[in-house]
């Protein structure tokens, strides 16, 4: 072997003919057959180092045994040739590519220290210890080679040694890189190396890395790179092919892809503040749907998305549906995500109440309520996007609207817009269905602009238009009287006081929590109304100022015209005409 010094300086000539004779000048006395290939060898050097061949030769009834067949030898004829060379003390190289199959072949041939010191098992073990395990890259290469050597490689501990070595070296590399670069955003070079492992080995490596102290963001980066490498271009040729499951080869490929997706999802951190990007979670959700992953896998992804749903974009929610005859978008998945999001908000509120001594936080702009308002706006935009879908059923559309509580929307302008788009895209709805859909709009939560549009919208039921006009008049009346919202608030408070008197303490507490939310929402609405009134006041003032300017200009114009006429009279010196006196009057005056 090149790695170790050869045991003998004078070695026989090696023949590479079809007969695979080791000695070209000495006739062999035994033929070893491995996977159909024959090796013409000598018994003595083989039985001196191989316990298995020694037992086979000894157990043979015919002492003149000249042929042996070795079945299922790890590495096949190539590894047996190297083991035979070792028995004949011939030079060959142990590398990371052949050390694992050579170690398994030595185990199969029972080349232990019981038959010869520094036998092949010991030599390969030494190579693993001194060369492979100190290197992360070589450990990955050897572990990859173990894929075809199972279960023997597992039994003799090669896989476990390599996995442990990879985890420890990754932790060391991480510490060294942080000390050298003095920053935490160093991209580990080993992330790409791990992408070559099979999913079963990769799973064990990731678990070992987590236990050895490798940073969570580094593990997430590795998971993302592995997913991008192993799932690249997944599902494109067979998305709309109904016969894809009937093809055996394609079904096998999808089965492997499904195993990869489910394993990667199980390795993702489950913490609320994990560093897994949201767009990656949505991408994995799409892939999980394409490969028909298990329900537990998809629910795990949806739960992780719900932890940070308020940071999602509209494009993230637009997951295409793969079911024939269904809507264009996967509305059911988004509905489940929203349910998980509401559960998360409730849990956070309960935690806040425990911290506050059992009382709900008095802050109007609490974090949970802020997240809920963001998601409310996101859902309204999503509803407007899916509303034109001609295959979207009314029940699914209504379910998407009702999944969020009333206090998730300060104003209903977005909801009104999406419903109007749905009515426009589904003109065949009956009057009853239109009423059922439009009753979800709270007319008191529509802005001035939305109310003006609704009052002239011919697609809306008449009763909704009447309600819009009524509440618009009521709003103007309250605005003029200066009692905007007071009547509504007092009415809610008085009604809640009467109802809470007949409730149990637990129901009363739940009712108070609900009323508290409603009051917070009503205050938010009042702020919006106040903003609208301020805008209207500015417009009215501007209009009055413009009108006063016009009137002033008219007065000045009339005054200037009068002055102009007087000036003309002075310029021409027009005198008033004297009255004519008759002769008779002259005579009377003389007399």
Image (cartoon, rainbow, N blue to C red):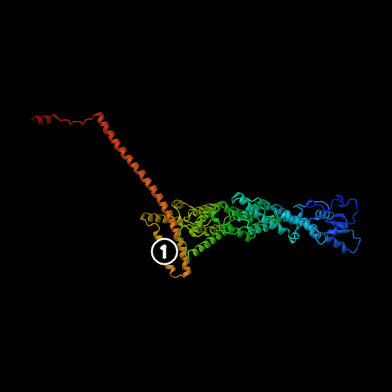
Looking at the image, residue 88 sits to the left or right of residue 411; the answer is right
| Location of mark 1 (residue) | 493
Measured as percent of width and height from the top left, residue 467 is found at: 44, 57
Measured as percent of width and height from the top left, residue 194 is found at: 68, 53
Camera-nearest residue between 138 and 131: 131
Measured as percent of width and height from the top left, residue 152 is found at: 76, 60
* Element marked by disc 1: helix
**Rendered view: 567 above or below 374:** above
Q: Quadrant of the image for the C terminus? A: top left
Looking at the image, residue 89 sits to the left or right of residue 273; the answer is right
Camera-nearest residue between 201 and 417: 201
Give the residue drawn at x 29%, y 33%: 564
Q: Is residue 60 visible?
A: yes
Name of the residue lying farthest toward the left: 591
Looking at the image, residue 238 sits to the left or right of residue 271; the answer is right
| Label 1 environment density (alpha carbons within 10 Å; few <14, some 14–19, many ≥20) | few
Q: Is residue 320 visible?
A: no
Looking at the image, residue 23 sits to the left or right of residue 224; the answer is right
Camera-nearest residue between 35 and 538: 35
Q: Residue 343 falls in which quadrant of the image?
A: bottom right
Measured as percent of width and height from the top left, residue 198 is found at: 70, 55
Camera-nearest residue between 273 and 384: 273
The number of discs equals 1
**Rendered view: 346 above or below 315:** below
């Amino acid at each position: 072997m090149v790695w170790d010094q050869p045991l003998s300086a004078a070695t026989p000539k090696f023949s590479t003919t079809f007969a695979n004779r080791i000695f070209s000048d000495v006739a062999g006395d035994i033929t070893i057959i491995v996977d159909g290939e024959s090796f013409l060898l000598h018994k003595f050097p083989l039985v001196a180092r191989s316990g298995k061949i020694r037992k086979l030769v000894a157990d043979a009834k015919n002492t003149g045994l000249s042929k042996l067949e070795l079945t299922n030898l790890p590495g096949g004829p190539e590894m047996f040739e190297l083991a035979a060379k070792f028995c004949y003390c011939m030079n060959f190289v142990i590398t990371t590519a052949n050390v694992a199959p050579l170690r398994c072949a030595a185990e199969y041939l029972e080349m232990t220290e019981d038959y010869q010191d520094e036998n092949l098992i010991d030599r390969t073990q030494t190579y693993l210890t001194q060369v492979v395990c100190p290197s992360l890259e070589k450990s990955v290469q050897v572990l990859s080679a173990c894929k075809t050597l199972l279960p023997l490689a597992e039994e003799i501990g090669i896989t476990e040694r390599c996995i442990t070595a990879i985890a420890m070296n990754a932790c060391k590399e991480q510490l060294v890189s942080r000390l050298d670069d003095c920053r935490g955003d160093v991209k580990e070079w080993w992330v790409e190396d791990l992408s070559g492992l099979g999913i079963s080995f990769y799973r064990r490596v990731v678990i070992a890395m987590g236990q050895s102290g490798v940073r969570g963001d580094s593990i997430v980066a590795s998971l993302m790179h592995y997913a991008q490498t192993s799932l690249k271009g997944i599902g494109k040729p067979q998305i709309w092919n109904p016969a894809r499951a009937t093809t055996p080869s394609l079904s096998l490929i999808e089965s492997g892809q499904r195993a990869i997706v489910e394993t990667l999802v199980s390795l993702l951190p489950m913490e609320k503040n994990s560093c897994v990007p949201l767009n990656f979670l949505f991408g994995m959700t799409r892939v999980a749907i394409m490969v028909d992953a298990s329900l537990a896998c998809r629910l795990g992804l949806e739960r992780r998305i719900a932890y940070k749903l308020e940071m999602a974009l509209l494009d993230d929610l637009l997951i295409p549906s793969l079911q024939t005859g269904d809507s264009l978008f996967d509305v059911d998945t988004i509905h489940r995500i929203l349910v998980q999001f509401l559960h998360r908000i409730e849990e956070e509120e309960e935690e806040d109440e425990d911290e506050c001594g059992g009382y709900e936080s008095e802050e109007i702009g609490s974090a949970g309520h802020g997240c809920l308002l963001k998601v409310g706006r996101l859902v309204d935009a999503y509803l407007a996007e899916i509303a034109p879908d001609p295959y979207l059923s009314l029940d699914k559309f209504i379910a998407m609207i009702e999944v969020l509580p009333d206090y998730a929307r300060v104003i209903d302008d977005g909801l009104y817009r999406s419903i109007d788009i749905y009515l426009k895209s589904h003109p065949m709805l009956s009057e009853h269905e239109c009423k059922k859909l439009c009753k979800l709009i709270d007319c008191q939560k529509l802005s001035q602009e939305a109310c003006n549009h609704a009052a002239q919208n011919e697609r809306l039921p008449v009763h909704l238009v009447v309600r819009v006009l009524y509440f618009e008049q009521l709003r103007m009346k309250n605005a003029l009287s200066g009692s905007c919202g007071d009547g509504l608030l007092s009415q809610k408070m008085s009604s809640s006081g009467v109802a809470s008197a007949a409730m149990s303490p637990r129901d009363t507490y739940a009712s108070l929590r609900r009323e508290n939310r409603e009051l917070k929402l009503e205050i938010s609405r009042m702020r919006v109304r106040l903003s609208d009134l301020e805008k209207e006041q500015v417009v009215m003032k501007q209009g009055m100022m413009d009108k006063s300017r016009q009137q002033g200009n008219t007065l000045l114009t009339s005054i200037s015209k009068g002055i102009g006429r007087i000036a003309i009279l002075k310029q021409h010196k027009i005198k008033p005409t004297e009255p004519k006196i008759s002769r008779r009057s002259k005579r009377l005056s003389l007399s």
